[in-house]
Image (cartoon, grey):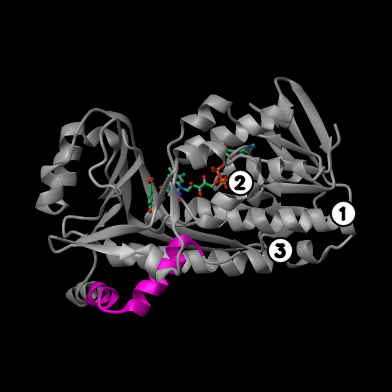
Amino acid sequence: MKTQVCIIGGGPSGLMLSQLLHLKGIDTIVLEKHSREYVLSRIRAGVLEHGFAELMREAQCGERMDAEGEIHEGFFISHDGVLDRVDLEKYSGGSSVVVYGQTELTRDLYDARDKMNGAVIHNAEDVKPHDLTSDKPYVTYRDGDEVIRIDCDYVIGADGFHGVSRKSIPRDVLTEYEKVYPFGWLGVLSRTKPVSPELIYAKHERGFALCSLRSQVLSRYYIQVPLSDSVEDWSDDDFWAELKRRLPQEVADRMETGPSIEKSIAPLRSFVAEPMRYGNLFMAGDAAHIVPPTGARGLNSAASDIYYLYHAMVAHYKDGDDSGLENYSAKALARVWKAQRFSWWMTTLLHTFPDSIPYDQKLQQTDLEYLFSSEKALGSLAENYVGLPF
Ligand code: FAS
Ligand code: PHB
Protein backbone atom coordinates (compact mmCIF):
# COMPACT_ATOMS: atom_id res chain seq x y z
CA MET A 1 0.00 0.00 0.00
CA LYS A 2 1.15 3.59 -0.55
CA THR A 3 -0.04 6.92 0.78
CA GLN A 4 1.34 10.41 1.22
CA VAL A 5 0.83 10.68 5.02
CA CYS A 6 0.52 7.60 7.23
CA ILE A 7 -1.13 8.48 10.57
CA ILE A 8 -0.67 6.17 13.57
CA GLY A 9 -3.62 6.58 15.94
CA GLY A 10 -7.35 6.96 15.35
CA GLY A 11 -8.10 9.32 18.24
CA PRO A 12 -9.10 12.98 17.78
CA SER A 13 -5.60 14.09 16.71
CA GLY A 14 -5.15 11.50 13.99
CA LEU A 15 -8.70 11.71 12.68
CA MET A 16 -8.75 15.51 12.61
CA LEU A 17 -5.49 15.69 10.62
CA SER A 18 -6.64 12.97 8.23
CA GLN A 19 -9.89 14.82 7.57
CA LEU A 20 -8.25 18.25 7.08
CA LEU A 21 -5.59 16.88 4.68
CA HIS A 22 -8.19 14.93 2.70
CA LEU A 23 -10.12 18.15 2.10
CA LYS A 24 -6.96 19.54 0.51
CA GLY A 25 -6.49 16.48 -1.68
CA ILE A 26 -3.66 15.01 0.39
CA ASP A 27 -3.91 11.24 0.79
CA THR A 28 -3.71 9.65 4.26
CA ILE A 29 -4.16 6.26 5.90
CA VAL A 30 -5.03 6.07 9.63
CA LEU A 31 -3.92 2.99 11.59
CA GLU A 32 -5.81 2.43 14.87
CA LYS A 33 -4.91 -0.48 17.13
CA HIS A 34 -8.38 -0.78 18.69
CA SER A 35 -11.88 -1.21 17.33
CA ARG A 36 -14.01 1.88 16.70
CA GLU A 37 -16.35 0.80 19.50
CA TYR A 38 -13.44 0.69 21.95
CA VAL A 39 -12.17 4.13 20.94
CA LEU A 40 -15.67 5.58 21.31
CA SER A 41 -16.17 3.93 24.71
CA ARG A 42 -13.50 6.09 26.35
CA ILE A 43 -14.86 9.08 28.32
CA ARG A 44 -12.31 11.90 28.24
CA ALA A 45 -12.32 15.62 27.54
CA GLY A 46 -15.35 17.86 27.79
CA VAL A 47 -14.27 21.45 27.11
CA LEU A 48 -13.19 22.67 23.66
CA GLU A 49 -11.21 25.85 23.14
CA HIS A 50 -12.35 28.31 20.52
CA GLY A 51 -9.49 27.14 18.25
CA PHE A 52 -10.49 23.48 18.45
CA ALA A 53 -14.10 24.32 17.62
CA GLU A 54 -12.91 26.34 14.60
CA LEU A 55 -10.82 23.39 13.39
CA MET A 56 -13.87 21.10 13.65
CA ARG A 57 -15.81 23.53 11.46
CA GLU A 58 -12.92 23.81 8.97
CA ALA A 59 -12.85 20.00 8.84
CA GLN A 60 -16.59 20.10 7.95
CA CYS A 61 -17.31 18.21 11.20
CA GLY A 62 -18.72 21.02 13.33
CA GLU A 63 -22.45 20.71 12.57
CA ARG A 64 -23.49 18.49 15.55
CA MET A 65 -21.06 20.33 17.86
CA ASP A 66 -22.73 23.64 16.95
CA ALA A 67 -26.19 22.11 17.34
CA GLU A 68 -25.64 20.13 20.57
CA GLY A 69 -22.57 21.69 22.19
CA GLU A 70 -23.03 24.45 24.78
CA ILE A 71 -21.26 27.81 24.60
CA HIS A 72 -19.92 28.62 28.06
CA GLU A 73 -18.88 32.20 28.84
CA GLY A 74 -17.66 31.53 32.37
CA PHE A 75 -17.12 29.00 35.13
CA PHE A 76 -17.07 29.01 38.94
CA ILE A 77 -14.32 28.38 41.45
CA SER A 78 -15.71 27.37 44.85
CA HIS A 79 -13.54 27.85 47.92
CA ASP A 80 -14.16 28.48 51.62
CA GLY A 81 -17.86 27.75 51.10
CA VAL A 82 -18.38 30.44 48.44
CA LEU A 83 -18.73 30.41 44.64
CA ASP A 84 -16.67 32.96 42.67
CA ARG A 85 -17.36 33.27 38.94
CA VAL A 86 -14.65 33.66 36.31
CA ASP A 87 -16.23 35.72 33.52
CA LEU A 88 -14.41 34.32 30.50
CA GLU A 89 -16.26 36.48 28.00
CA LYS A 90 -15.36 39.70 29.84
CA TYR A 91 -11.77 38.87 30.74
CA SER A 92 -10.78 37.12 27.49
CA GLY A 93 -12.01 40.02 25.38
CA GLY A 94 -15.14 38.30 24.08
CA SER A 95 -14.16 34.63 23.74
CA SER A 96 -15.72 31.50 25.22
CA VAL A 97 -15.45 27.68 25.19
CA VAL A 98 -17.70 24.93 23.82
CA VAL A 99 -18.76 22.13 26.16
CA TYR A 100 -19.02 19.05 23.92
CA GLY A 101 -17.64 15.62 24.82
CA GLN A 102 -14.56 14.15 23.18
CA THR A 103 -16.52 10.96 22.57
CA GLU A 104 -19.03 12.90 20.43
CA LEU A 105 -16.45 14.84 18.44
CA THR A 106 -14.49 11.64 17.79
CA ARG A 107 -17.74 10.08 16.53
CA ASP A 108 -18.26 13.11 14.26
CA LEU A 109 -14.72 12.76 12.90
CA TYR A 110 -15.21 9.03 12.21
CA ASP A 111 -18.51 9.75 10.45
CA ALA A 112 -16.84 12.41 8.29
CA ARG A 113 -14.02 10.02 7.38
CA ASP A 114 -16.61 7.37 6.40
CA LYS A 115 -18.54 9.86 4.23
CA MET A 116 -15.34 10.62 2.29
CA ASN A 117 -14.28 6.98 2.15
CA GLY A 118 -11.30 7.87 4.32
CA ALA A 119 -8.90 4.99 4.98
CA VAL A 120 -9.14 4.23 8.72
CA ILE A 121 -7.87 0.74 9.53
CA HIS A 122 -8.99 -0.61 12.92
CA ASN A 123 -7.51 -3.47 14.93
CA ALA A 124 -4.14 -2.76 13.30
CA GLU A 125 -1.73 -4.86 15.37
CA ASP A 126 2.02 -4.36 15.96
CA VAL A 127 2.16 -1.06 14.08
CA LYS A 128 5.81 -0.17 13.49
CA PRO A 129 7.34 2.86 11.71
CA HIS A 130 10.54 2.18 9.70
CA ASP A 131 13.36 4.17 7.99
CA LEU A 132 12.13 7.40 9.54
CA THR A 133 15.33 9.31 8.65
CA SER A 134 15.23 8.17 5.02
CA ASP A 135 13.19 9.87 2.28
CA LYS A 136 11.23 6.62 1.91
CA PRO A 137 9.81 5.85 5.35
CA TYR A 138 7.24 3.11 5.71
CA VAL A 139 4.96 1.62 8.35
CA THR A 140 4.07 -2.03 8.89
CA TYR A 141 1.21 -3.58 10.81
CA ARG A 142 -0.25 -7.02 11.30
CA ASP A 143 -3.70 -8.13 10.18
CA GLY A 144 -3.92 -11.57 11.72
CA ASP A 145 -0.85 -13.43 10.45
CA GLU A 146 -0.33 -11.12 7.50
CA VAL A 147 2.19 -8.26 7.78
CA ILE A 148 1.17 -5.30 5.64
CA ARG A 149 3.53 -2.52 4.52
CA ILE A 150 2.49 1.08 3.83
CA ASP A 151 5.00 3.23 1.95
CA CYS A 152 4.60 6.96 2.59
CA ASP A 153 6.27 10.36 2.53
CA TYR A 154 5.58 11.18 6.18
CA VAL A 155 4.54 9.36 9.38
CA ILE A 156 2.39 11.11 12.00
CA GLY A 157 2.60 9.80 15.57
CA ALA A 158 -0.91 10.56 16.89
CA ASP A 159 -0.95 7.41 19.00
CA GLY A 160 -1.27 8.85 22.48
CA PHE A 161 0.90 8.53 25.56
CA HIS A 162 1.28 4.75 25.33
CA GLY A 163 1.79 4.65 21.58
CA VAL A 164 4.66 3.32 19.49
CA SER A 165 5.80 6.51 17.74
CA ARG A 166 7.62 8.24 20.61
CA LYS A 167 9.33 4.92 21.41
CA SER A 168 10.64 4.85 17.81
CA ILE A 169 12.80 7.91 18.46
CA PRO A 170 16.33 7.05 19.69
CA ARG A 171 16.85 7.74 23.40
CA ASP A 172 19.80 10.02 22.68
CA VAL A 173 17.60 12.20 20.46
CA LEU A 174 14.60 12.52 22.78
CA THR A 175 14.39 14.58 25.97
CA GLU A 176 11.43 13.81 28.25
CA TYR A 177 10.17 16.15 30.97
CA GLU A 178 7.75 14.65 33.51
CA LYS A 179 6.02 15.62 36.72
CA VAL A 180 3.72 13.04 38.39
CA TYR A 181 1.12 14.36 40.85
CA PRO A 182 0.47 12.49 44.14
CA PHE A 183 -3.25 11.97 43.37
CA GLY A 184 -5.69 11.02 40.61
CA TRP A 185 -9.20 11.98 39.51
CA LEU A 186 -12.12 9.61 40.08
CA GLY A 187 -14.61 10.49 37.32
CA VAL A 188 -18.31 9.58 37.16
CA LEU A 189 -20.74 10.01 34.26
CA SER A 190 -24.42 9.97 35.26
CA ARG A 191 -27.76 10.56 33.51
CA THR A 192 -28.68 13.35 35.89
CA LYS A 193 -29.39 17.06 35.47
CA PRO A 194 -26.11 18.97 35.93
CA VAL A 195 -25.95 20.71 39.30
CA SER A 196 -24.80 23.98 37.71
CA PRO A 197 -25.28 25.62 34.29
CA GLU A 198 -21.52 26.33 34.26
CA LEU A 199 -18.57 24.25 35.49
CA ILE A 200 -17.60 24.42 39.16
CA TYR A 201 -13.94 23.84 40.08
CA ALA A 202 -13.93 23.23 43.85
CA LYS A 203 -10.93 23.75 46.13
CA HIS A 204 -11.56 22.00 49.45
CA GLU A 205 -9.42 20.73 52.32
CA ARG A 206 -10.78 17.22 51.68
CA GLY A 207 -9.60 17.46 48.07
CA PHE A 208 -10.44 18.93 44.67
CA ALA A 209 -13.79 18.34 42.95
CA LEU A 210 -15.17 19.32 39.53
CA CYS A 211 -18.79 19.59 38.41
CA SER A 212 -19.00 19.40 34.62
CA LEU A 213 -21.51 18.16 32.06
CA ARG A 214 -22.00 16.67 28.60
CA SER A 215 -25.61 17.89 28.10
CA GLN A 216 -28.57 19.02 30.20
CA VAL A 217 -29.30 15.36 30.98
CA LEU A 218 -25.76 14.01 31.29
CA SER A 219 -23.44 15.12 34.11
CA ARG A 220 -19.70 14.57 34.53
CA TYR A 221 -18.21 14.83 38.02
CA TYR A 222 -14.70 14.28 39.40
CA ILE A 223 -13.14 14.10 42.85
CA GLN A 224 -9.44 14.04 43.70
CA VAL A 225 -8.48 10.65 45.20
CA PRO A 226 -5.19 9.18 46.52
CA LEU A 227 -3.14 7.25 43.95
CA SER A 228 -3.65 4.15 46.12
CA ASP A 229 -7.42 4.18 45.46
CA SER A 230 -9.09 1.95 42.90
CA VAL A 231 -12.55 2.28 41.34
CA GLU A 232 -13.68 -0.72 43.40
CA ASP A 233 -13.07 1.34 46.59
CA TRP A 234 -15.82 3.76 45.59
CA SER A 235 -19.49 2.83 45.58
CA ASP A 236 -21.80 5.32 43.86
CA ASP A 237 -23.20 6.35 47.25
CA ASP A 238 -19.72 6.98 48.66
CA PHE A 239 -18.84 9.03 45.57
CA TRP A 240 -21.91 11.26 45.80
CA ALA A 241 -21.47 11.76 49.55
CA GLU A 242 -17.81 12.81 49.12
CA LEU A 243 -18.55 15.07 46.16
CA LYS A 244 -21.21 16.91 48.18
CA ARG A 245 -18.83 17.36 51.14
CA ARG A 246 -16.45 19.28 48.86
CA LEU A 247 -19.09 21.71 47.52
CA PRO A 248 -20.82 24.75 49.06
CA GLN A 249 -23.98 23.68 50.94
CA GLU A 250 -26.33 25.44 48.46
CA VAL A 251 -24.80 23.37 45.62
CA ALA A 252 -24.73 20.08 47.55
CA ASP A 253 -28.39 20.54 48.53
CA ARG A 254 -29.54 20.73 44.90
CA MET A 255 -27.30 17.91 43.60
CA GLU A 256 -29.29 15.31 41.64
CA THR A 257 -27.61 11.93 42.12
CA GLY A 258 -28.07 8.70 40.19
CA PRO A 259 -26.29 5.51 39.09
CA SER A 260 -22.88 5.91 37.45
CA ILE A 261 -22.88 4.85 33.80
CA GLU A 262 -19.09 5.21 33.71
CA LYS A 263 -16.62 5.36 36.59
CA SER A 264 -12.83 5.53 36.21
CA ILE A 265 -9.69 6.89 37.84
CA ALA A 266 -7.21 8.88 35.74
CA PRO A 267 -3.71 9.52 37.09
CA LEU A 268 -2.44 13.11 36.79
CA ARG A 269 0.85 13.86 35.13
CA SER A 270 2.60 16.65 33.23
CA PHE A 271 4.74 15.36 30.39
CA VAL A 272 6.53 16.75 27.35
CA ALA A 273 8.79 14.92 24.85
CA GLU A 274 11.15 17.05 22.75
CA PRO A 275 11.63 17.32 19.82
CA MET A 276 8.22 16.55 18.28
CA ARG A 277 9.89 15.63 15.00
CA TYR A 278 12.42 12.92 14.11
CA GLY A 279 13.30 12.67 10.42
CA ASN A 280 9.96 12.19 8.64
CA LEU A 281 8.07 11.33 11.85
CA PHE A 282 5.98 14.13 13.37
CA MET A 283 4.32 13.61 16.77
CA ALA A 284 1.04 15.31 17.71
CA GLY A 285 -1.24 15.33 20.76
CA ASP A 286 -0.82 12.97 23.69
CA ALA A 287 1.98 11.12 21.90
CA ALA A 288 4.18 14.12 22.70
CA HIS A 289 2.58 15.81 25.71
CA ILE A 290 0.20 15.21 28.61
CA VAL A 291 -1.31 17.66 31.08
CA PRO A 292 -3.35 17.19 34.27
CA PRO A 293 -6.97 17.81 33.12
CA THR A 294 -7.52 20.66 35.61
CA GLY A 295 -7.11 23.34 32.95
CA ALA A 296 -8.98 21.40 30.21
CA ARG A 297 -5.86 21.72 28.02
CA GLY A 298 -5.30 18.05 27.07
CA LEU A 299 -7.32 17.70 23.91
CA ASN A 300 -6.92 21.41 23.20
CA SER A 301 -3.10 21.18 23.12
CA ALA A 302 -3.51 18.57 20.38
CA ALA A 303 -5.52 21.11 18.36
CA SER A 304 -2.62 23.48 17.74
CA ASP A 305 -0.28 20.60 16.85
CA ILE A 306 -2.80 19.51 14.22
CA TYR A 307 -3.30 23.06 12.99
CA TYR A 308 0.46 23.56 12.47
CA LEU A 309 0.94 20.13 10.84
CA TYR A 310 -2.05 20.63 8.53
CA HIS A 311 -0.76 23.96 7.22
CA ALA A 312 2.82 22.66 6.97
CA MET A 313 1.75 19.64 4.91
CA VAL A 314 -0.41 21.74 2.59
CA ALA A 315 2.49 24.19 2.05
CA HIS A 316 4.79 21.26 1.26
CA TYR A 317 2.52 19.46 -1.20
CA LYS A 318 0.94 22.53 -2.84
CA ASP A 319 3.83 25.05 -2.85
CA GLY A 320 6.96 22.98 -2.25
CA ASP A 321 7.46 25.12 0.87
CA ASP A 322 8.97 23.08 3.73
CA SER A 323 9.34 25.92 6.24
CA GLY A 324 6.29 24.76 8.21
CA LEU A 325 7.69 21.26 8.53
CA GLU A 326 11.12 22.57 9.52
CA ASN A 327 9.64 24.88 12.18
CA TYR A 328 6.90 22.48 13.39
CA SER A 329 8.55 21.13 16.53
CA ALA A 330 9.72 24.50 17.88
CA LYS A 331 6.42 26.20 17.05
CA ALA A 332 4.24 23.43 18.53
CA LEU A 333 6.37 23.17 21.69
CA ALA A 334 6.15 26.93 22.33
CA ARG A 335 2.35 26.64 22.71
CA VAL A 336 2.53 23.20 24.39
CA TRP A 337 4.68 24.57 27.21
CA LYS A 338 2.26 27.46 27.81
CA ALA A 339 -0.54 24.88 28.21
CA GLN A 340 1.76 22.90 30.53
CA ARG A 341 2.33 25.98 32.67
CA PHE A 342 -1.37 26.83 32.89
CA SER A 343 -2.38 23.24 33.70
CA TRP A 344 0.29 23.01 36.41
CA TRP A 345 -0.83 26.36 37.86
CA MET A 346 -4.56 25.41 37.96
CA THR A 347 -3.68 22.01 39.48
CA THR A 348 -1.41 23.55 42.13
CA LEU A 349 -3.99 26.22 42.95
CA LEU A 350 -6.95 23.89 43.47
CA HIS A 351 -5.74 20.51 44.76
CA THR A 352 -4.87 19.37 48.28
CA PHE A 353 -1.30 18.11 48.28
CA PRO A 354 -0.66 15.37 50.86
CA ASP A 355 2.86 16.62 51.59
CA SER A 356 2.09 20.35 51.58
CA ILE A 357 3.42 22.46 54.47
CA PRO A 358 1.43 25.32 56.07
CA TYR A 359 3.42 27.84 54.02
CA ASP A 360 2.25 26.15 50.76
CA GLN A 361 -1.35 26.30 51.98
CA LYS A 362 -1.02 30.03 52.69
CA LEU A 363 0.35 30.54 49.18
CA GLN A 364 -2.64 28.69 47.69
CA GLN A 365 -5.01 30.90 49.70
CA THR A 366 -3.13 34.04 48.67
CA ASP A 367 -3.11 33.00 45.00
CA LEU A 368 -6.92 32.64 45.10
CA GLU A 369 -7.36 35.96 46.91
CA TYR A 370 -5.07 37.70 44.40
CA LEU A 371 -6.93 36.09 41.47
CA PHE A 372 -10.31 37.46 42.51
CA SER A 373 -8.90 40.86 43.48
CA SER A 374 -7.15 41.56 40.15
CA GLU A 375 -8.74 42.00 36.74
CA LYS A 376 -5.31 41.40 35.21
CA ALA A 377 -4.98 38.05 37.01
CA LEU A 378 -8.48 37.08 35.83
CA GLY A 379 -7.48 38.18 32.33
CA SER A 380 -4.48 35.86 32.41
CA LEU A 381 -6.60 32.91 33.56
CA ALA A 382 -9.31 33.66 30.98
CA GLU A 383 -6.98 33.99 27.96
CA ASN A 384 -5.34 30.67 28.83
CA TYR A 385 -8.62 28.87 29.46
CA VAL A 386 -10.29 29.96 26.18
CA GLY A 387 -7.05 29.10 24.40
CA LEU A 388 -3.99 31.14 23.48
CA PRO A 389 -3.79 31.98 19.76
CA PHE A 390 -2.38 29.30 17.42
P1 FAS B 1 -5.54 9.60 22.15
O1 FAS B 1 -4.83 8.84 23.24
O2 FAS B 1 -6.93 10.08 22.38
O3 FAS B 1 -5.59 8.71 20.81
C1 FAS B 1 -4.49 7.92 20.43
C2 FAS B 1 -5.03 6.74 19.66
O4 FAS B 1 -3.92 5.97 19.20
C3 FAS B 1 -5.89 5.83 20.53
O5 FAS B 1 -7.13 5.58 19.92
C4 FAS B 1 -5.05 4.55 20.66
O6 FAS B 1 -5.85 3.38 20.69
C5 FAS B 1 -4.20 4.59 19.41
N1 FAS B 1 -2.93 3.88 19.53
C6 FAS B 1 -2.13 3.82 20.61
N2 FAS B 1 -1.05 3.07 20.34
C7 FAS B 1 -1.18 2.65 19.04
C8 FAS B 1 -0.39 1.84 18.19
N3 FAS B 1 0.76 1.31 18.61
N4 FAS B 1 -0.83 1.60 16.93
C9 FAS B 1 -2.01 2.16 16.50
N5 FAS B 1 -2.81 2.93 17.27
C10 FAS B 1 -2.38 3.17 18.52
N6 FAS B 1 -8.30 16.08 28.32
C11 FAS B 1 -9.08 17.12 28.69
O7 FAS B 1 -8.95 18.21 28.12
N7 FAS B 1 -10.03 16.95 29.70
C12 FAS B 1 -10.20 15.75 30.34
O8 FAS B 1 -11.04 15.62 31.23
C13 FAS B 1 -9.40 14.65 29.98
N8 FAS B 1 -9.56 13.42 30.59
C14 FAS B 1 -8.74 12.37 30.22
C15 FAS B 1 -8.86 11.10 30.82
C16 FAS B 1 -8.01 10.04 30.45
C17 FAS B 1 -8.15 8.69 31.12
C18 FAS B 1 -7.02 10.25 29.46
C19 FAS B 1 -6.08 9.14 29.06
C20 FAS B 1 -6.90 11.50 28.84
C21 FAS B 1 -7.77 12.56 29.21
N9 FAS B 1 -7.67 13.82 28.61
C22 FAS B 1 -8.46 14.87 28.96
C23 FAS B 1 -6.73 14.07 27.58
C24 FAS B 1 -7.32 13.51 26.32
O9 FAS B 1 -8.53 14.15 26.02
C25 FAS B 1 -6.27 13.67 25.27
O10 FAS B 1 -5.71 14.97 25.29
C26 FAS B 1 -6.79 13.37 23.91
O11 FAS B 1 -7.33 12.08 23.94
C27 FAS B 1 -5.62 13.51 22.93
O12 FAS B 1 -6.00 12.95 21.75
P2 FAS B 1 -4.94 12.12 20.88
O13 FAS B 1 -3.67 12.88 20.79
O14 FAS B 1 -5.67 11.73 19.64
O15 FAS B 1 -4.57 10.82 21.75
C1 PHB C 1 -14.82 17.29 31.65
O1 PHB C 1 -15.98 17.70 31.46
O2 PHB C 1 -14.50 16.09 31.49
C2 PHB C 1 -13.77 18.26 32.08
C3 PHB C 1 -14.04 19.62 32.02
C4 PHB C 1 -13.06 20.53 32.41
C5 PHB C 1 -11.84 20.06 32.87
C6 PHB C 1 -11.57 18.69 32.92
C7 PHB C 1 -12.54 17.78 32.52
O3 PHB C 1 -10.88 20.95 33.27
Q: Are marks 1 and 3 in contact (CB under 8 Å)?
A: no
The nearer-to-camera label among 1 and 3 is 1
- Residue 6 colored in magenta in the image: no
Residue 318, numbered circle: 1
Residue type at mark 2: give it: Arg
Give the percent coordinates (x, y) of residue 252: 13, 46
Q: Are marks 2 and 3 in contact (CB under 8 Å)?
A: no
Q: Secondary structure at mark 3?
A: helix
Q: Is residue 269 left or right of residue 205?
A: right
The nearer-to-camera label among 2 and 1 is 2
Asked if the residue at label 3 sits under 8 Å from ligand 1, the reply is: no
Disc 2 target residue: 57
Disc 3 target residue: 328
Question: Is residue 289 visible in the rendered structure shown here?
Answer: no
Look at the picture and state if 289 lies above or below 26: below
Q: What residue is drawn where x is 45% and y is 65%? A: 94
Q: Residues within 10 Å of mark 1 (few under 14, many from 20)?
A: few
Question: Is residue 131 visible in the rendered structure shown here?
Answer: yes
Q: Secondary structure at mark 2?
A: helix
Choose the circle earlier in sequence order: 2 or 3.
2
Q: Main secondary structure of the magenta part?
A: helix
- Picture quarter containing residue 222? top left
